[in-house]
Image (tube, rainbow, N blue to C red):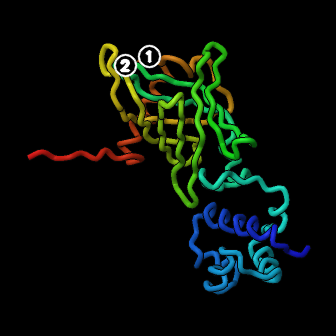
């Protein structure tokens, strides 16, 4: 099947996605594909022949020309990832955070990650039949990044979350920056550890207000404590004299 000008950007994206997914350098890609580094540098900007693509497909056992047809790409401003690249993120999660004011409580929300064709991005949505104002955010995954970003905008009130990518235990850990109630009706910017854990099935006891002494509390607390303990995030402080 001949390669036309319409296919070239999609093939380039497929190669870039392979490099990012495998977490390898261009040099390593060149070695795997049995090509020169200079050839790979040209490929990633769209300069290649059909013969070169056939060689890559044969050496790596992948189908680059097939990905050019019907591939779904996210918008460039969210990372230009493909739907296939992020398929493992689709599903249901528990998003948990500490209480703003009560250290003995953890708040846990049932969330779902979906691919939205009109938004051309992954979206995370809260699932709750009892709430009118549900949490919602768009997911950003920069190329070759080890983290994902979630930005939520509710009538100008922004909430930003940075999470490690999904690990083998289906866990993500990171930080959230939002506005929280400091006292009375006074709100202030707050940063806190958060987790987003993927489950095949979410039971009622796993979401809502989670009190100390419950099985869910112990599980979430262990993961939330690991955010700083295992250096998924670092607090930067200014020392005073």
Depth check: 39 or 24 in front? Answer: 39
Residue 73, how many percent across, how many down?
Answer: 72, 54
Q: Which residue is mark 1?
A: 211
Q: Quadrant of residue 177?
A: top left
Which label's residue is closer to the chain start, 1 or 2? 2
The percent coordinates of residue 112 (x first, y second) are 65, 32
Front residue of 83/225: it is: 83
User: At 53% from the left edge and 18% from the top edge, which residue is drawn?
Assistant: 208
Q: Nearer the viewer, residue 49 or 36?
A: 49
Place of residue 220 in the rendered image (x, y in percent of width and height, measured from the top left): 47, 29
The secondary structure type at the circle numbered 2 is loop
Mark 1 and mark 2 residues within 8 Å of each other at the beta carbon: yes
In the rendered image, which quarter is residue 62 located in?
Answer: bottom right
Q: Which mark is residue 104?
A: 2
Judged left or right of residue 156, residue 28 is right
Q: Is residue 169 above or below residue 222?
A: below
Visible residue check, residue 103: no
Q: How far is disc 1 from disc 2 in space, using C-alphas?
A: 6 Å
């Amino acid at each position: 099947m001949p390669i036309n000008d319409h296919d070239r950007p999609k093939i380039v994206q497929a190669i870039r996605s392979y490099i990012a997914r495998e977490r390898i350098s261009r040099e390593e890609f060149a070695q795997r594909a049995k090509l020169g580094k200079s050839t790979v540098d040209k490929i990633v900007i769209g300069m290649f022949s059909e013969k070169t693509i056939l060689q890559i497909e044969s050496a790596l056992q992948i189908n680059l020309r097939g990905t050019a047809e019907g591939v779904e790409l996210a918008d460039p401003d969210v990372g230009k990832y493909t739907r296939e690249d992020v398929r493992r993120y689709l599903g249901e999660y528990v998003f948990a955070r500490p209480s703003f004011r009560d250290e003995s409580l953890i708040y846990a929300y049932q969330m779902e990650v979906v691919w939205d064709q009109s938004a051309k991005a992954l979206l995370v949505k809260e699932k709750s039949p009892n709430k009118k104002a549900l949490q919602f955010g768009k997911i950003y995954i920069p190329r070759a990044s080890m983290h994902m970003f979630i930005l939520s905008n509710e009538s100008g009130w922004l909430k930003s979350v940075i999470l490690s990518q999904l690990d083998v235990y289906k866990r993500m850990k990171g930080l959230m920056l939002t506005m929280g109630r400091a006292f009375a009706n006074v709100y202030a910017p707050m940063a806190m550890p958060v987790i987003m854990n993927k489950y095949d099935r979410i039971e009622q006891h796993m979401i809502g207000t989670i009190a100390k002494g419950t099985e869910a509390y112990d599980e979430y607390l262990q993961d939330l404590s690991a955010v700083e303990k295992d250096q998924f995030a670092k607090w930067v402080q200014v020392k005073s004299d």
